[in-house]
Image (spheres, rainbow, N blue to C red):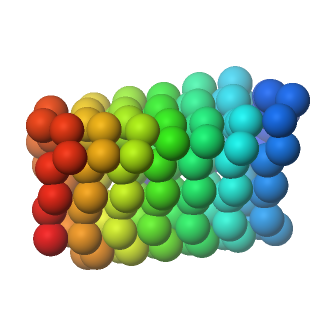
């Protein structure tokens, strides 16, 4: 389980939007072009760029998300990387240290226990 502490975060110059009740850990970089919806938790040393994170999701320490959409109530484990163009559905659980290749689509309420290296993979 992730541990979260609210602290100073780093923003890039381009616009980003954090809705109410967003918790962000130390040394986390948000932006450019990021929207994070309410009741979302993001761990320390994470980086999120050009992405949309829907409400109630948890992204643990060291997570990297680029150019992707993360659905509501989704859990992304420590040191996981989600590449450009990926769409992760609502209620998805992704284990620690997983790599999600570019343009991967994961349907709602799936458990991802190992890396997905094939670009454009669809998991329904």
Residue at position x 81%, y 68% in the image: 20
Image vertical order of residue 21 relative to residue 76, above or below = below
Q: Nearer the viewer, residue 51 or 54?
A: 51
Q: Position of residue 70 (x, y in %)?
A: 46, 59
Would residue 77 be seen by someone viewing this image from the given angle?
A: no
Q: Nearer the viewer, residue 65 or 74?
A: 65
Which quadrant of the figure contains the C terminus? bottom left
Q: Is residue 69 left or right of residue 7?
A: left
Image vertical order of residue 67 relative to residue 106, above or below = above
How many numbered discs?
A: 0
Residue at position x 40%, y 46% in the image: 85
Q: Is residue 37 left or right of residue 113?
A: right
Q: Position of residue 57 (x, y in %)?
A: 51, 63
Image vertical order of residue 10 relative to residue 56, above or below = above
User: Where, by quadrant of the figure, is residue 99 drawn?
Assistant: top left
Q: Position of residue 15 (x, y in %)?
A: 84, 44
Q: Is residue 123 left or right of residue 32?
A: left
User: Where, by quadrant of the figure, is residue 17 drawn?
Assistant: bottom right
Residue at position x 62%, y 62% in the image: 40
Q: Nearer the viewer, residue 109 or 122?
A: 122
Would residue 28 be seen by someone viewing this image from the given angle?
A: yes
Q: Nearer the viewer, residue 107 or 74?
A: 107
Residue at position x 45%, y 68% in the image: 71
Q: Is residue 66 left or right of residue 74?
A: right
Q: Position of residue 84 (x, y in %)?
A: 42, 38
Image vertical order of residue 50 relative to residue 1, above or below = above
């Amino acid at each position: 389980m992730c541990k979260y502490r609210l602290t100073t975060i780093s923003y890039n110059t381009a616009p980003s939007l954090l809705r109410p009740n967003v918790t962000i850990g130390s040394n986390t970089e948000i932006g450019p072009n990021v929207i994070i919806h309410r009741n979302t938790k993001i761990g320390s040393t994470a980086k999120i760029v050009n992405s949309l994170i829907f409400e109630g999701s948890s992204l643990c320490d060291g997570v990297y998300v680029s150019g992707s959409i993360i659905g509501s109530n989704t859990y992304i484990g420590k040191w996981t990387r989600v590449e450009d163009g990926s769409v992760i559905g609502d209620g998805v659980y992704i284990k620690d240290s997983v790599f999600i290749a570019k343009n991967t689509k994961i349907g709602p309420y799936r458990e991802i226990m190992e890396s997905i290296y094939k670009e454009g993979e669809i998991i329904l």
